[in-house]
Amino acid sequence: MSTSLKPFNTFGIQADASRIIVAETVQQLTNAWSETVAANKPVLILGEGSNVLFLEDYSGTVIINRILGIEITEDADAWHLHVGAGENWHQLVEYTLQKDMPGLENLALIPGCAGSSPIQNIGAYGVELKSVCHYVDCVDLLTGEMHRLDNSQCRFGYRDSIFKHEYQNHYVITAVGLRLPKLWQPVLTYGDLTRLDVANVTPKDVFNAVCHMRTTKLPDPRINGNAGSFFKNPVVAADQAAELLSTFATIPHYPQPDGSVKLAAGWLIDQCQLKGYNVGGAAVHKQQALVLINEMDASSRDVVDLAHHVRQCVGEKFNVWLEPEVRFIAANGEVSAVETIA
Ligand SMILES: Cc1cc2nc3c(=O)[nH]c(=O)nc-3n(C[C@H](O)[C@H](O)[C@H](O)COP(=O)(O)OP(=O)(O)OC[C@H]3O[C@@H](n4cnc5c(N)ncnc54)[C@H](O)[C@@H]3O)c2cc1C
């Protein structure tokens, strides 16, 4: 098998791995992990590579998780889905709608695997995975033990979960359990969804509206490589938000339950006139400033230098220092994305 990672990352960055293995069962995956660790090489588990930036060649084995299978059960109140981690997320959304099991429509067209969805608690248009996630199955690769974490144990937060902390190393997610309530409640709080008629809207209407917004506003990774939102929306303390508002009256701001305030990273970048700005082959997307794209054979250096420039401009203008949402992978594994672009 080729060792190029280019087909396995949506940024379309060229990097090689020593070895790439596609695992279709938990056994294959754990075997590949054990063999590589025994050879003292690093291991990276990947879904569809839609949230990673390869900084250089990877010195170990990349295991592509393709554990498939969807099992459905139901009780009086809800449908319960047990989904193999390697299932494609968007196809799962389509499948549930075809089976008249709504609840995932706001999360349509998010690239990646179902098994990756809990890691950063994927979210879009007012819905996050945490609202439908019942449990996450993972294997501790050091002991071979299976763990089932219920929703609260996953410690979901904004683009965050336990899988970015205690359960990040030597754990692999093998399946996700979803609970879709039979009493469907549309979430129509964002974008074009606010124009839908809540009394008559169907899940398919929401799905279509979400797909339309995404395909018109976000670059297609097959044409311009990208990893979606490059930066997280920054969350600042209330007094910093008040100070910013006194200088920039129109700054979009979203008060959070804990008193902090979330700002829109795309707006901050746009205010620095950076749409279309490029470094080498990497550019800030012209329609959506939050997305950095591989416009023309970008190297990871181009992306890192561009991200540094964006962070610097926003930091100097607003004293808000952006942090990447994208995970940075160096030769031996993940490295701090913030430190890399600082
Ligand atoms: C065009 C575009 C739009 C996007 N829009 C959104 C959006 O609206 N909302 C949103 O939240 N995200 C969005 N994203 C980001 C991305 O879709 C999600 O983060 C997605 O969940 C990543 O899935 P993946 O399978 O590609 O993960 P990968 O990129 O393959 O992996 C991400 C990280 O998880 C680890 N990992 C992967 N699989 C496993 C596993 N089974 N067990 C343990 N660790 C694992 C990897 O090592 C890596 O560190 C977008 C991306 C793109 C390209």
Image (cartoon, rainbow, N blue to C red):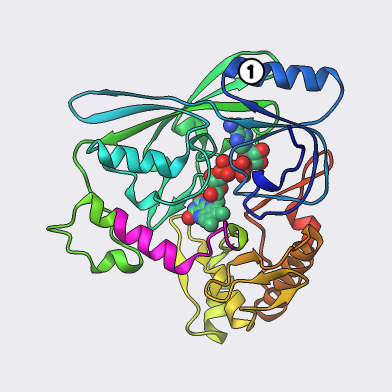
Residue at the extreme front of the image, as rendered? 1
Which of the two residues, 257 or 175, is positioned nearer the viewer here?
175
3 over 234 or under it: above or below = above
Residue that numbered label 1 is attached to: 28
User: Which quarter is ligand 1 in?
Assistant: top right
Query: In the image, is residue 109 part of the stretch drawn in magenta?
Result: no
- Residue depicted at 33% across the width and 49% down the height: 105
- Residue 299 spot, x, y in % from top left: 78, 60
Residue at disc 1, secondary structure: helix
- Residue depicted at 87% across the width and 23% down the height: 40
Whether disc 1's CB lies below 8 Å from ligand 1 is answered no
Q: Is residue 333 left or right of residue 264?
A: right
Identify the image quadrant of residue 166: top right
- Residue depicted at 57% across the width and 68% down the height: 265
The rendered magenta stretch, by its main secondary structure, is classed as helix
Query: In the image, is residue 218 part of the stretch drawn in magenta?
Result: yes
Q: Is residue 96 left or right of residue 31?
A: left
Identify the image quadrant of residue 271: bottom right
- Residue depicted at 57% across the width and 19% down the height: 25
The magenta segment is 207-223
- Residue 21 spot, x, y in % from top left: 69, 28
> From the image, which quarter does the C terminus lie in?
bottom right
Identify the image quadrant of residue 224: bottom right
- Residue 45 spot, x, y in % from top left: 67, 33
139 over 289 or under it: above or below = above
Which of the two residues, 274 or 241, is positioned nearer the viewer here?
274
255 over 18 or under it: above or below = below
What is the three-letter code of the residue carrying label 1?
Gln
> From the image, which quarter does the N terminus lie in?
top right
